[in-house]
Amino acid sequence: MVDHPLRPSAVVGVVGGGQLARMMAQAAGPLGIDLRVLGGPSDEGAATVAPIERGDITDPGTLERFAAACDVLTFDHELVPIETVRHVEEAGHAVRPGSASLRLSDKALLREALAGRFPLPPHTVAHAASEAVAFGDEHGWPVVVKAARGGYDGRGVNVAENAQDVALFMHALDEGVPAVVEPVLDLEAELAVVVVRRPGGEMRTYPVVRTIQVDGQCHEVAYPAGVERSVEEAATRLAGEVAETIGAVGILAVECFVVDGEVLLNEIAPRPHNSGHWTIDGAVTSQFENHLRAVLDRPLGSTEPSWPAVTMLNLIPGDPPADPRDHVAAALATGAHVHVYDKTPRPGRKVGHVTATGSDPGAVRAQAIAAAASMGSITAGGSP
Amino acid sequence: MVDHPLRPSAVVGVVGGGQLARMMAQAAGPLGIDLRVLGGPSDEGAATVAPIERGDITDPGTLERFAAACDVLTFDHELVPIETVRHVEEAGHAVRPGSASLRLSDKALLREALAGRFPLPPHTVAHAASEAVAFGDEHGWPVVVKAARGGYDGRGVNVAENAQDVALFMHALDEGVPAVVEPVLDLEAELAVVVVRRPGGEMRTYPVVRTIQVDGQCHEVAYPAGVERSVEEAATRLAGEVAETIGAVGILAVECFVVDGEVLLNEIAPRPHNSGHWTIDGAVTSQFENHLRAVLDRPLGSTEPSWPAVTMLNLIPGDPPADPRDHVAAALATGAHVHVYDKTPRPGRKVGHVTATGSDPGAVRAQAIAAAASMGSITAGGSP
């Protein structure tokens, strides 16, 4: 970093400097990959482990200059405007995933692109409050109103009891951003399937996991998912077909609802995803290493789990926020693996995760909870 | 690295900037540890993954200034003079391992300190050629003449057929460095046991591995070791007792000979060691993470293997030297894990390693050999 006398085996540029870029950087070293980051002014996470350039990630010229120094450009988030991504592609730089699949992290565009081909929840895309109200009147109240893009960790997702709520939520949307409106579903489970795919189509799929959300924010990821085998198979098949349909390159996380035994597509993330953090300590090849391999068009690593049971808990401070870095020793004493992100602790912000592995799902989960509790995380709350 | 807005959970300073410092740095990030390196002018390995300060590592003032900015000082190698280490300790800085155990990486001092308490090969410490010749005349020729310190990868170890050879080898020793003289033993196996120990005495031991040396340089490390259970137990017991006796802190690698079913102590390395590289991909906690935990006096991680069989092969270029970084994709295609060190390839120099994991030792070894072969390493030569 400080000096770099030798040519790397490849140069990967990551747009965005959060924990995903951080964990990509940690996976890059063993493969001789030089990983560089283009981050916004306040990005934390990557800065303590990789060289970070601060710049305007929405500016086509900035992005193109950054891409020109790299073998391939990839992403820590979906905040780069699609037109900017297209500009860089058109200038001849390798961008993976490309704009065609990146744009489908927009919940409305995803539904429009895949409706009729994949099982989706009942929904409408509302550009005006009246459209959302009509959906509620038809399918029953309350309804879920989701910002098509820009939301994360539950932000931008609201439950509307009536037309007045709808008006409030629609009014809060950014200019030009529509809402996806859906019924409040009776979920048996939320599942995630992480797929990795090379440009030529070689693809591997990690095992299905169950994700546990609280107020729309992921708290816990569990392997095995604890659902019927037929449900796991349906989710795996769905994820693979979605990845092929949209031409995903790199990691694609596919999030699903299970309703009445049926697997419905909820949303996708075309990048390493929270539901795959467990693979660092719990699978043969981590999602971060496989993402790098895929975007560089190198052979993929095994996606097999290394243990019969794995639980990942996010580290999310309460109020006042504890800093997990003050409690690393206590967390290690539980036997769990600890990952801190070097992010300023704030209430409700993901600043790390812990992973427990072993044979017995109950014991593994208890260990992860003990670790999260020792670090003052709200995710240690007990049973979901 | 480029900016560091947040306090780390701890600061560890590593003296020496080779691949051990590199792999410590890779283990430091998830735990929020800021790892800094003080390296010599030509050190490679760590420089592409951690901030490296170039300086004279034998100079007490330089070392003390470096130590003052760190919570604890540890080592990538044994090249710092013991007097310099003592100077830093006496100035009140935490140095782990300390000078008392560091000095025992000197083969002559080790034998003097442990003779009578642990089973050692027959030996003498020769300060003059005549002493070595007398040993050969008594125990039979040829004899092995080893530089007590400064040797590595087989350098400094020679087989003398007669008094003339002895004179030649003794003459080549650095001023003041004695030789350890031993018979040429009929080795059933060479084993290594990696132990990790905290300042207060908490200790964990990795499983016994077999090491395969060619011309004194480690080519291969295999788990399981494939020796009798009683031999494994004797080696494990020996390693633990040595660690306690010398007050080791951090990783201690204990290398043993098996002769006539008996386990003899060969030498020790008070730091992460080549015989433990397999733990990155093959054990619950890597030796590098456990070394950091131990020198920071934090709870140790499990040393259990994650797989029934693991083979590690060093990547060592032949002549002309191939650069493993040119062949990462081919190596990944074999299914093995790849670790390159960002070191300039030279014939006979360790510039990386590959690790294969699985259920069947034969298949695992074959995969590791295929990976090493694809990277042009001489360690892919086939059966030892």
Image: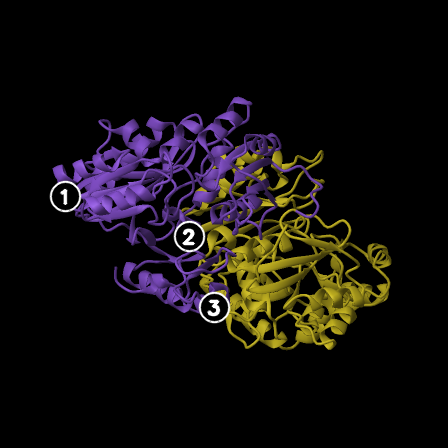
Chain colours: A yellow, B purple
* Residue B332 at x, y percent in the picture: 46, 66
Residue at position x 50%, y 62% in the image:
A206
Q: Chain of mark 2?
A: A
Classify mark 1: residues with Cα within 10 Å, few (<14), some (14-19) or many (20+): few
Classify mark 3: residues with Cα within 10 Å, few (<14), some (14-19) or many (20+): some
Task: Return the mark for residue B327.
Answer: 3
Which quadrant: the C terminus of chain B?
A: bottom left
Residue at numbered disc 1: B260
Q: Classify mark 1: helix, strand or loop.
A: loop
Q: Classify mark 3: helix, strand or loop.
A: loop
Amino acid marked by disc 2: Trp
Task: Return the mark for residue A307.
Answer: 2
Q: Classify mark 2: helix, strand or loop.
A: loop
Circle 2/circle 1 CB separation < 8 Å: no
Task: Return the mark for residue A309.
Answer: none
Residue at position x 54%, y 55% in the image:
A29
Amino acid marked by disc 1: Asp
Residue at position x 33%, y 44% in the image:
B172
- Compared across the picture, whether B362 is left or right of A350 comes to left
